[in-house]
Image (cartoon, rainbow, N blue to C red):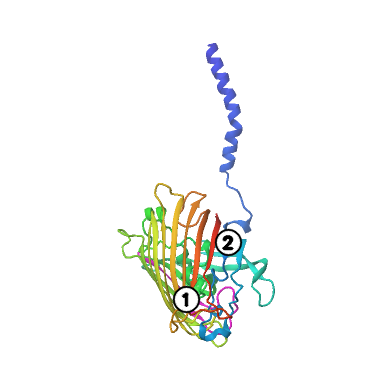
Amino acid sequence: MRHLQTVAAILAFMTLLAAPALGAEQATETPIQLPKGLAGISIGFLGYVDYSYGPFANISEVKASNLTTSATLAASSFKDDDWKNQNRFELTRGYIIINKEILPWLSARVTPDVTRVSSGPGEQEGGDLDVRFKYYYLEARPPDLGPFTHNAIKIGQQQFPYLDFLENINPYRMQGTMFQERFHNFNSADMGLGIQGLFGGEVGEDYQKRVNHFYPGRWGSYSLAVMNGGGYHAAEANDNKALEYRLSARPFPDRLPGLQFTYFGIWGKGNTAAAPDWRVNTGLLSYQHELGTLTVEFARNKGEQSGADEKWRTGYAVFGVVRPPMVPRLRASAQYGVWRFDTAVKENDLTMWRAGLDWSLTPPRDIGGTFVYAGYERLGYGEAYRTAAGQAVPDEWRAQVVAQINW
């Protein structure tokens, strides 16, 4: 009897000790009542902290207006001292991603970003970090319409139909601008009206979980937009509107779900009062697997977004990633591309290539997450390019370490 009393006393004592914990657990399960204005809001962050070293001036963005050939030396903006060594830390992106659900079918996104502003008229970026809006739009989600599913209509400053798709296949936007964006064919956002969606529902959950859950259309996806055309960092300089469209096909959703064929086009005018023709014709072959990614991109365009001219341009790029199965946090990547600003001029190719390794600091995900990249990049100029003094334009290179911070 005495033993039973002892056991009962111990159980009673343990119950008293556990009571606060049980109460705390019940308290955590009680729904938190947010203020009305905060209900339905989600906040994320995406930032790139970059360290680069080497002799480079235009490696991240090469404008046609920066270049000249031996026939037009007087127009060159290249100076012989442009290739001095750079040794710098920089914040190249700083998004605060704010999404708000207004109604079950209606939401809004506001994304301020930081950029290095010019220190004076006509000068290079070198002043304060300033805040600008990268995205600012309202999104409505209408019901499915036959094979067109997961549709979304956006109005405001929003993603370009192509680059958002590409950046969710090639995760190295943090290393520098994407291939065609680097040569100023177009950029990543603009003001306008767009509609996008999937074809035939979604591809299998296993593929989305292990490989890529972005744009998961079973048979592909689409995006169609009418934009101002100047991009998010330029005011509208004419009354033209650019028609932009992307179609992506996934022909074997069960046997080869990672294989997609994409076409992207723009029909519009360059962003000047003269409004020269601006045409983009881009094809992309992409294949994604949990062990790696391969893309081949080809473009034949006329003019460019800024309205610099109406010359025909052409280029291609090959990109690949390998992820060793025994070290899932490690990836190796490389890219090689060639761009010609004027198909009528010989030996004016610009050749870029890069290679690097990255290590995920968070549990590995298909795209995104927090990781650190270290690599080497080189940009070579064809024989036709000259500096203002008539000298051959030297190659640019940089060694780079970038931390992508994402949650």
Q: Which residue is drawn at 64% across and 67% down?
A: 116
The answer to whether any part of residue 97 appears in the image is no
Q: Where is residue 373 in the image (x, y as percent from the top left)?
A: 51, 56
Magenta-drawn stretch contains 252: no
Is 209 or 396 nearer to us in this picture?
A: 396
The answer to whether any part of residue 63 appears in the image is yes
Q: Position of residue 43 (x, y in %)?
A: 58, 57
Residue pointed to by mark 2: 53
Q: Which residue is drawn at 54% across and 18% down?
A: 7
Is 31 or 351 nearer to us in this picture?
A: 351
Count of numbered tags: 2
Secondary structure of the residue carrying tag 1 is loop
Vertically, is 233 above or below 202? Answer: below
Q: Which residues, given as a range, are shown in magenta?
A: 219-244
Q: Which residue is drawn at 58% across and 30% down?
A: 18
Is 276 or 23 nearer to us in this picture?
A: 276
Query: Where, quadrant-wise, is the C terminus in this rendering?
Result: bottom right
Vertically, is 240 above or below 163? Answer: below
Residue pointed to by mark 1: 382
Report which quarter residue 84 is drawn in. Answer: bottom right
